[in-house]
C-alpha cells in the first residue's frame, strides 16, 4: 500500500467534501439546463480590484531583470514593508518589516508556523466550530487539536478556553471573522482572552502563542469592525492572505506577522524562514509579492458580498431556518431543523444504504449529513456542520451569484416544508 | 522555548548555509567597490524566454472572469494536459493529464509526495552526494534518509543501492542531472536500477517508488541527454519544475507526474490532492499555471550556461582542482586539495576559534569547511560538500555572470597556491 496511514485517515475524514463535490458534478451532468444551487464552496468569486490588475499589467510589462528569480525565503523587503504598515494599522501595534514572512496563502502561513512551533504531542486549542482544515494542519505537525466550546450564537466562551489550556498547550487559533459562523469576536472578548492566556502563562511559565487567522478581516457587515489583537496580547502572530480582500485565492499570496513581544522572536523568525524551505514553499510567488506591495490596501467589490448576505438572510429566514449572527466572512451557519416524523423512516433507510456503500455509517447518521443529502435532491448543496466539529448545523457560502440566491429562495422553502413533514 | 526541537536541530544543521550567506554580506558591506566571487547560490539568473513574458502580458491583459480564483487542488486541466504531453515525450511513456498534479515548485511537489507515502520510520534511499534539502523533507514527513554511495566520478553504484534497500524502504530519489555533481545517470544505469528495484519488490512484495527529481533535465551539455525513466520502471513518479528551464524560480511552479503503472494509483492521486490541502499549498499559483500551459516547451537561453560552464571548467582546471564530470545542471563539484603543511597549524587554530564561537566544532574541522573559510578571504564563496553528505568536496554554481567567472580565474589560482603551501 503506497499511501501513508495518516493520509488514508485524512481522506476518510475529508470524504464528505468529496461527496458534496461529486454530488454537484452528478447534478450538473444529469441535466446541464437546470441550475445547481451550490452554496458549498468558500471560493471568492469577485473579480480583483482594477488597481491590482493594473499593477500586474505594469509589472509584467516591466523589463527589469531578475524579477522572477529567487529572493530571501521570507520575501521581498518592499512587500514585507507594505504588510508591516497594514498590520500595524489593523492591530494598533507597530510591526517591523523584519517581523513579516510572505507565505503561500494563509494556509501556507499556518503550516509554516505550526511546523516551527510544534513538538510531537503539543496541543493547539481551537474554538468550535473550527475551520475544517485546522485538524489536518495540526496533526501534520505532530500536534493535538483541543476544542473549546462557544457560548450562545457561537460567541467566545473564555471559561471554556481556560479549561482547554494545559501544560502542553503551545498555541490557540483565533479565527475572526470565523469560518463557518461569520462571527467576529469583539474587543472585550479579545481582552478577556488575553487575560486568560496571560494568567496561564504566569501559572505555567509559558504563555501560549495566540495565532490570529484573519483572512476575512475586510469582510465585515452592518458597521461591524474586527478589533485589533496584537496590541492586547504579547505572544501574537497574525496570519492572513489577500485571497478574499483582493479576490485572488488561486494566486496563493499571504503572510505571517510576528509581534516583537513574542518570546525568542529572533529564533522564531529563523524557524519560519527555515520552515519555508523545509516544507517546500521556498518563497511566496514573486510576481504576486510585487503586486501586493503596490496594492496592499485595495479591496475587491466586497460590498457585493453585503448584498448577497442580505438576500441569503432573507431566503433563509423566510424558510424558517435559525442561524448564527453572520457578522463577517461570507458564510451563514444554520441550525438543521428537526426532521418531521414522515421522513425519519426514509432517512434511516437511506443512511443504512449510504453507510454500506461508503463503508462508514457514522457520518451518514449525523442529522446535518442527512439534511445535506436531502437538500441535494432539490439541487441545493451546502456543507454539513460535522466537518467543522458541529453536527446539527450546516454552512452555506454566499460567495455565489446573486441570481442563484434569488433562485434558491422558493426551492429552499419548498424543501424545508417537505423536511418537516 | 517557542520553537520546536526538530526545527532547532534543522537550523543547527543548516547553519553553514547561513554562515556563507553572512560571510557574503559581510564582504559586500566591508568594501562594496570590490567584487565578491559568489559561487554559492543555485539561483538561475537568466531572464525567462520572451514567449513566457509575452504569455504573461497576454494573460494579465485578458479580462476573462475567475482567472485568479481557486481551481481543483491538482490544477487546471489545460495545464495538466501540457505537462502530460511534455512528460510523455521526455519519459517515452504515455502520461494522462489526470495523473499530473501541479505543485508549488519541485520542492513543493517532493513534500506533497513524501507526505502522501511516508509512515513514521519508512525509509527513503538517496544517492550521495544528495541535494541538501532532501534530509529536511524526509525527516519532516517522518521518514529516515538512507544513503547509498556512488562509484568513481559519482556514477550510480547499483550494488550500493541494493544494499541500502530494506523492508522499510518506501522510495528512492534519483536526482538527474544531479545537484551538486552535475552527473547525468545514463540509460544503462536506469535499467540496472530498475532491475534492482524490481528484484527487491519481488523479494519483499513491495516495489519502492522511484522518485525522479529532475528540475535540471533541460540543462545538459556537450550532447549529453537525460534518458527517460518512466518507461523503464513501473513505480515511477516524476517531479520537476520550470524554475530552471523557464528561469522563474521565484514563481514556484512545478509538477508531479505519476506513472499509470503505480500500485494503487488512484488512491495515490487522491492522497496527493489531499496533501496539497493538508500542507497548505492548496494549489500551484493560478497565473503561472496558465502561463506554463502555453509555453511548457520553451527554454530560457540555457546555452549561456554552457558558455559559463566552459569558462569555469577552464578556471578550475588551470587552478589544478579535480572535479566530477559536470554533464548537466549548473554546478561543478570539486575535490578539496590537500592543505599544505604551512597552513595546517593556522587552520587548526581558526577551527578551534570558530568552533567555540558557533558552539559546534565538528563542522569547522571538516576540510571542505576549512577550504570555504579560506577562500572567502579571497572573496570567493562556495558551498562546502558536507552540506551534501560529502565532506572533502565543494560545490561551485555557475549560475553567475560570465564576468565573475573570468574575474575569479586568477584569484582562484593565487588562493590555491597559498592553500597548498
Image (tube, coloured by chain):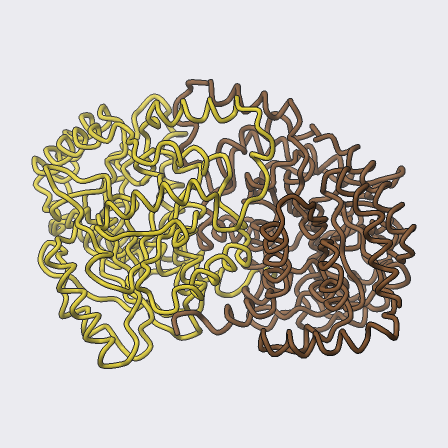
Chain colours: A brown, B yellow
Q: Residue at x 26, y 64 (%)?
A: B234
Q: Position of residue B323 (x, y in %)?
A: 12, 46
Q: Quadrant of the N terminus of chain A?
A: bottom left
| Figure check: B347 above or below A253 | below
Q: Is residue A188 left or right of residue A37?
A: right
Q: Residue at x 81, y 43 (%)?
A: A226
Q: Is residue B25 visible?
A: no
Q: Position of residue B114 (x, y in %)?
A: 41, 62
Residue B113 found in image quarter = bottom left
| Figure check: A407 above or below A262 | above
> How many numbered circles are shown?
0
Q: Position of residue A160 (x, y in %)?
A: 83, 69
Q: Quadrant of the C terminus of chain A?
A: bottom right
| Figure check: A274 above or below B400 | below
Residue A414 found in image quarter = bottom right
Q: Position of residue A179 (x, y in %)?
A: 74, 53
Is B366 in front, or is B167?
Answer: B167
Q: Residue at x 55, y 42 (%)?
A: A252
Q: Is residue A39 left or right of residue B225?
A: right
Q: Is residue A293 visible?
A: yes
Q: Is residue A44 left or right of residue A114?
A: right
Is B204 in front, or is A323?
Answer: A323
Residue A257 found in image quarter = top right
Amino acid at each position: 500500500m503506497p499511501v501513508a496511514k495518516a493520509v488514508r485517515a485524512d481522506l476518510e475524514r475529508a470524504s464528505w467534501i468529496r461527496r458534496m463535490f461529486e454530488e454537484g458534478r452528478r447534478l450538473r451532468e444529469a441535466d446541464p439546463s437546470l441550475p445547481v444551487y451550490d452554496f458549498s464552496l468558500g471560493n471568492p468569486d469577485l473579480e480583483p480590484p482594477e488597481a491590482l490588475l493594473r499593477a500586474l499589467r505594469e509589472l509584467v510589462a516591466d523589463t527589469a531583470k531578475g524579477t522572477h528569480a529567487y529572493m530571501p525565503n521570507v520575501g521581498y523587503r518592499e512587500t514585507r514593508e507594505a504588510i508591516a504598515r497594514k498590520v500595524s494599522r489593523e492591530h494598533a501595534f507597530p510591526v517591523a518589516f523584519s517581523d513579516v514572512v510572505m507565505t503561500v496563502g494563509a494556509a501556507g502561513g499556518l503550516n509554516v508556523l505550526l511546523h516551527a512551533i510544534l513538538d510531537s504531542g503539543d496541543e493547539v486549542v481551537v474554538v468550535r466550530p473550527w475551520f475544517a482544515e485546522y485538524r489536518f494542519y495540526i496533526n501534520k505537525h505532530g500536534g493535538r487539536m483541543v476544542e473549546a466550546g462557544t457560548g450562545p450564537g457561537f460567541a467566545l466562551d473564555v471559561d471554556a478556553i481556560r479549561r482547554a489550556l494545559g501544560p502542553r498547550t503551545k498555541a490557540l487559533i483565533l479565527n475572526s471573522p470565523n469560518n463557518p459562523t461569520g462571527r467576529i469576536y469583539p474587543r472585550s472578548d479579545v481582552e478577556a482572552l488575553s487575560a486568560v492566556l496571560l494568567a496561564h502563562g504566569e501559572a505555567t511559565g509559558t504563555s501560549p502563542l495566540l495565532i490570529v487567522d484573519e483572512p476575512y478581516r475586510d469582510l465585515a457587515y452592518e458597521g461591524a469592525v474586527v478589533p485589533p489583537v496584537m496590541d492586547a496580547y504579547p505572544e501574537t502572530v497574525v496570519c492572513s492572505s489577500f485571497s478574499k480582500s483582493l479576490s485572488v485565492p488561486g494566486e496563493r499570496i499571504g503572510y505571517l506577522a510576528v509581534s516583537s513581544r513574542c518570546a525568542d522572536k529572533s529564533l522564531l523568525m529563523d524557524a519560519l524562514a527555515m520552515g519555508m524551505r523545509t516544507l517546500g514553499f521556498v518563497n511566496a510567488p514573486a510576481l504576486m509579492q510585487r503586486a501586493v506591495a503596490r496594492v496592499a490596501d485595495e479591496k475587491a467589490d466586497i460590498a457585493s458580498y453585503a448584498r448577497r448576505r442580505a438576500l441569503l438572510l432573507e431566503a433563509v429566514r423566510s424558510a424558517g431556518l435559525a442561524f448564527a449572527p453572520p457578522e463577517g466572512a461570507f458564510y451563514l451557519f444554520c441550525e438543521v431543523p428537526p426532521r418531521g416524523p414522515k421522513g425519519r423512516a426514509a432517512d434511516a433507510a437511506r443512511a443504512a444504504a449510504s453507510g454500506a456503500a461508503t463503508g462508514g455509517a457514522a457520518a451518514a447518521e449525523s442529522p446535518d449529513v442527512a439534511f445535506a443529502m436531502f437538500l441535494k435532491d432539490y439541487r441545493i448543496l451546502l456543507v454539513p456542520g460535522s466537518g467543522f466539529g458541529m453536527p446539527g448545523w450546516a454552512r452555506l457560502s454566499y460567495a455565489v451569484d446573486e441570481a442563484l440566491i434569488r433562485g434558491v429562495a422558493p426551492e429552499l422553502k419548498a424543501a424545508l416544508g417537505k423536511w418537516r413533514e
